[in-house]
Every structure is written in structure tokens, then in C-alpha cells.
Image: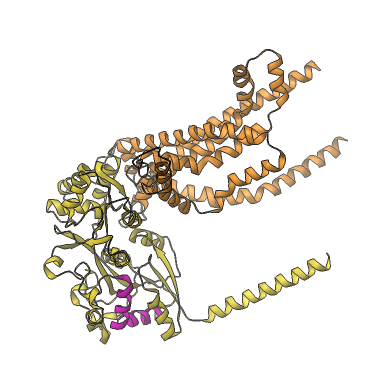
Amino acid sequence: MTNNTLKRVAKATLAAAALVAVASAAQAEEELNLYNWGDYINPQVLAKFTEETGIKVNLDTYGSNEEMLAKIQAGATGYDIVFPSVHMHDIMFQLGLLEKTDIGSDPAFKNIDPQFIRAKTDPDAEYCLPYAWGTVGIVYNKKKVAEMTGWEDLFALADKGEKIILLDDLRETIGIGHIMNGTSVNSTDEDEIKAAADYILERKKNVTAFTYDSIPLVQSGDVAAAHWYVGANIFVQQAPDVLAYVIPKEGATMYQEDICVLASAPNKDNAKKFLQFYLQPEIAALNVQQQLNGTPNLPARELLPPEIANNESIYPPQDVMEKLQIFVDLGRDLQLYNSEWTRIKTAQ
Amino acid sequence: MSKAHHTLESRRKLTLFGLLLPPSAFLAVFFLGPLAIMIVYSWLTPGLYGGVEWKFFHLNYGRILGWADTKYERFDPVYFEIFLRSVKLAATTVLLSLILCYPVAFWVSRMPEKRKNLVIFLITLPFFISLIVRLFAWVLILRPTGFFNQALMGLGLIDEPLEIIFTGTAVIIGMVYVFVPFMFLPLYASIEKLDLSLIEASQDLGANRLQTFFRVILPMTLPGIVGGSIIVFIPSLGNFIVPSLLGGAKVVMIGNLIEQQFLSARNWPFGAALGMMVMAAVLVLLLYYIRIVTREERQAGGLKVAEEVAA
């Protein structure tokens, strides 16, 4: 062994020792592991939490409720907090995956608008905290179409040869058929589901794609309009001359996610601290300012800048609110939607 | 002498055993294990929220093969149709990448050593970047305002952007793009070994170019062609990323269907049963490959014996 190699080995050993030292220091530190949808929390909220409590926050992301559930069911551990939609909150409760937090008895819980305690299995918010909500509507390119009011306009645009995109989501997309047929998006009636699927199927030839990745294509004008979430307002804000988001006048679906602590959470106390932290109106407002979605925290809304608080596509008036439907868990009947979705996707 | 030979032989066997043990153990744990789970799951009752219930259930196969007829588990020829469509796409991918790679492999194999290595490095270069990122780049290239259309319009070749993105053409472009390196490498390996003097001999003996190609070059590079085709066919059959991203998820492939069962439909056993169907098809193909390869070897062996006899 030459002198040179010896030196190199010594250096590598030193570096490795230093790494081990850093790693063990990190272990001693308090931690909180969030498992959230991609881009679904303002990073400043997390920074502020660390600043106030000294707890280090790690964030991992998922793309759908099912992906998250499949991972947790397959035994993924190490996560403290998840952000399931309301129907998934119910499912996870029934599967015994959630930890009781008694967040509903916290004095600051009076900040939460009670209509957002939606999970049937958690009527007193003993487990989870309502986090955020929003609508699923249409984002469109104003250079391609001057104004759009609803689903009828969207499909009329497609008939004229403009390109449109629908979500690659079986319940959301078949849900449009339900809304147009006047049936519930939670229908478990085979004929109603088939009729809703037929509505989409009849229009499929004019649908350019089924995807979530539509914003850049709408922005560039490659596609005129796309079925998307209220979060599109983030992009509308950046390019107000090009983009617009609308809640369809015929009605639309809405979603809501809750913050839940997992029964398998390694840092339960830190997780509860995070729930309490998020009850503060300032924090909920800070999140909305970046996310541009709805918060169930009533005093937080008063802290919002008027251009957000008065934006009717984010905080719609009560008559529009009443036309919004939220998905509930269908249990075994989901298979009916699954078969119809396969039928839609196979047709040419 | 025979004893020495014997110990040498047993030592060789021991070394071979030692060398093969780690990969065999690896395959047993990470290939056979999951495979066994899939086989078992495909015969179980779907759990309400994903997972399985430990009760025997045959309707997962019934849905595919024809005897299921309950409200939730109903036979539908559509699954078989989707499978055939995937086979067609995989076969098209194989054929196009073969046509593309075969002449290129010849060209590269005749290059000077240094440039040859550079070219092979360039062909494997895409592996250094995530597939998803590369496919999103294709979306940007192929869309109406993208590079490809703008370049053609700039050159005055077309007046209106071509409809490529979110069509079958985009899927095929993407698939061939993804699998070209897998076709190239085995093809190149067998073309590189091709003895040029045999081609000369064939020409000397009066064969024309076509005859030389079909009777000398093609049979001698056949193992590379078959190997490359199989290595491309198998993963293309299950690929679901390309049809989703470049095809706009408008057409379901067997891979999409399986993914859908495990995620949005929460029906793991049915997904496992569909997976088994793909597996069976792949297995048949592999057996066929093994038969061809062993026949080649036997022929080559026969040739050697003939040479020895002649000598």
C-alpha cells in the first residue's frame, strides 16, 4: 500500500466517522414525519412550526388517497401524520389506523366551522382536524375561449375542435356524468352509474387526454381547458391574463382533507402539537395564502387579503356551496365504478 | 491422473457453487418470494379496502376467463381485449426497434475501437436520467407548441401543428425510444462476433447480397435478434407509463389495468390474477426462446463435430 492510498483511506474513515456523528445527533433531535399530498402545505408553515417548537419536520408526499392507504397497509411505518380525504378518513378509522387525539376538545377548536366536521366515523373530531377544502372545476385558457361557465360549455368547446382534458380519476370523471344527469356522485345504482359513464363515453372522442398534468398545457394554449382543482388559482394568480378557474354552474364536486395522526406514529406527542399549532388562525391563514384553497378555520378567513377572501372561485357564495357534492366511501360498490371506468378507457 | 482430475473438477464445482449462491439467494428472496405472494393472492377474496381476506376465491380468474357472473365480479371479454392490444403494442415496439437497431449495430461494429466505445456509452446515457423526466420532455417536444412542431413549421414543411401528443403515434414513439437500448445491446453483441471472412466466403461461392444476408448473416445474428426481441417484448407488455403520459391515458394497456386494480379499484387479488396472465404469456415466450437457443447450440455443436471429422 503506498503512502498516498493510506492517506486517502484515513481521510475516508474520518469522513465516515463525521457522518455517523452527525446522524446520531440528528437522532437525538425531536422529529415529526408528515406524509402529505404533493405541494399541499405551505413550506413556511412547517418552518414556523420548527421555529416555535424546535421539532424538525420531514415531509414525504403521495399522489392519491389509495396510494397512501396501500403504503400504510403494506406496513410503511415512520409516518406520524397523514392528510386523507374525508372518505379515506372514515376508511382508515374503520381499519384502526388512526390515533385518538381529542383535538375536538381543544379550546381553540371553536375556530373550526362545524359544517366541516364531515367524517361520519368521527363526529366529535376526537381523531382528526379538518384541514382544507376546495372544489373541482375547470381551468381554461382565456385566449382560446373568452368565458366558460360550466360542463356544457366545456364539451361544446370540444365539439368545436378545441382540445380539452379530463382528470384520470374514475370517480371525479364519472362524477361529471352524474352531475349532468342529475344523479348523486355517490350513487350505487347500477343503471345510474352506467348512464353517468355513458355521458362521458359519448364525449370521449373529443377528449384529448385523461391526466392530472394539464396546467402547463392549458397555459401554453396546447389545450383550451382542463378539469382541475381549485389549486389552479395559484397559476391563475401568476398569469391572470391567460388563465381562469371556474366552478361549473351545473354543480361540481368538492374535496376536503383532514389532518390525522397514525396509530403507528413514532412521535405522537409531536404530532398532537402540530394539530394544536394548526388550529391558530394565523397559521391556517398563512397556509391559504400560498395554497389558495378553502380553510375551515373561521377567524383565519378574516386575516386573508381581500383578493383571496372575496374570490368566489375559492370561497363561493352559499347557493353555489349547496350545489357541491362530496365523495363518500362506497365500499364494495366502488367495483361498479371500476368496471365502467375500464369500459370508458377501452372504447375507441 | 484421474484422481487429480477428479479433485480439480470438484474444486471447480465448489467455486461455481460459491459464485452462484448469492445471486440465487437474491432471486429466491426478491423474485420467487413476491411471485409466490402474487400466486396466493390471486386465489383470495379481495379485502374491502385493499389487501385480501384469507378465503379461497376463484372469481378473479373467472372475470378474465369466463365463469364469473355476480354483481361485482362479472366476466368481461374486455380484459382479454386489453391484453391483446398490449401484445400488439409490444410487438410493434419490438419490430420498430429491431428495424432501427439492426443497421446501426452493423455500422457501430465496424467503427474504430475508440469511437465504438463512445457510441455505446452514448446509447446507454439515457439510463442516467429518470424515465419519468425523459417522458415529460417528450410531452414538451411533441405538443403543438413544442419543439418538433415549431421546427417543422419554421422550416415551412407544415402549416398547422401535427397532432402527435396524446395519440397512438406518440405512444409508439415513446415506447421505441425507451426500449431501443435494450434491443441494441444484444444485437450488437452478436453482430460484433460475426466473422467477416464467412461473408467473403459466401460471396466467393457465388451467393448474391440477398442470399448472403438471408443464409449467412441472418442465421448467425439470430440469437441477438431473438434475445433483443424478448428483452424488449417482456417489459413493453407491462409498460403503463408511456401510454399514460404520452397517450393521455385514453387507451388502457394491461399494465394500466393492473395498476388500477391495486390503487383506485382497491382489488388486489384481481390485479394479481391479471398479473399472472401476463406472467404466463411471458413464460411461454421464454420457453420458446430457450428452445431456439438450445437448437442453435446443438447445430453449432454438430458443426464442430463435422469439422473434427473432416480434419
**Rendering quarter of residue B148:** top left
Give the x, y percent position of residue B264: 32, 54
Q: Residue at 42%, 41% (x, y): give it.
A: B152
Task: Residue A168: give x, y in percent of width and height.
Answer: 31, 52
Residue A230 horizontal/vertical position (percent): 26, 64
* Residue B187 seen in the figure: yes
The residue at 27%/60% (across/down) is A243
Q: Nearer the viewer, residue B194 or B306?
A: B194
| Front residue of A33 and B1 | A33
Q: How is the image coloured?
A: by chain
**Residue A212 belongs to magenta span:** no
- Magenta residues, as a range? A270-297
> Which chain is depicted yellow?
A
State which quarter of the image contains the N terminus of chain B. Answer: top right
User: In the figure, B197 relative to B65: above or below?
Assistant: above
Residue B2 as seen in the image, left or right of residue B235: right
Q: Position of residue B249 (x, y in %)?
A: 34, 46
Identify by letter the chain in orange: B
Q: Main secondary structure of the magenta part?
A: helix
Instruction: State whether residue B208 is above or below residue B248.
Output: above
The residue closer to the viewer here, A300 or B111, is B111
User: Considering the image in quadrants, where does the C terminus of chain B appear?
Assistant: top right
In this view, B222 is above or below A98: above
Q: How many marks?
A: 0
Judge from the rendering whether residue B199 lies leftward or rightward of residue A100; answer left or right: right
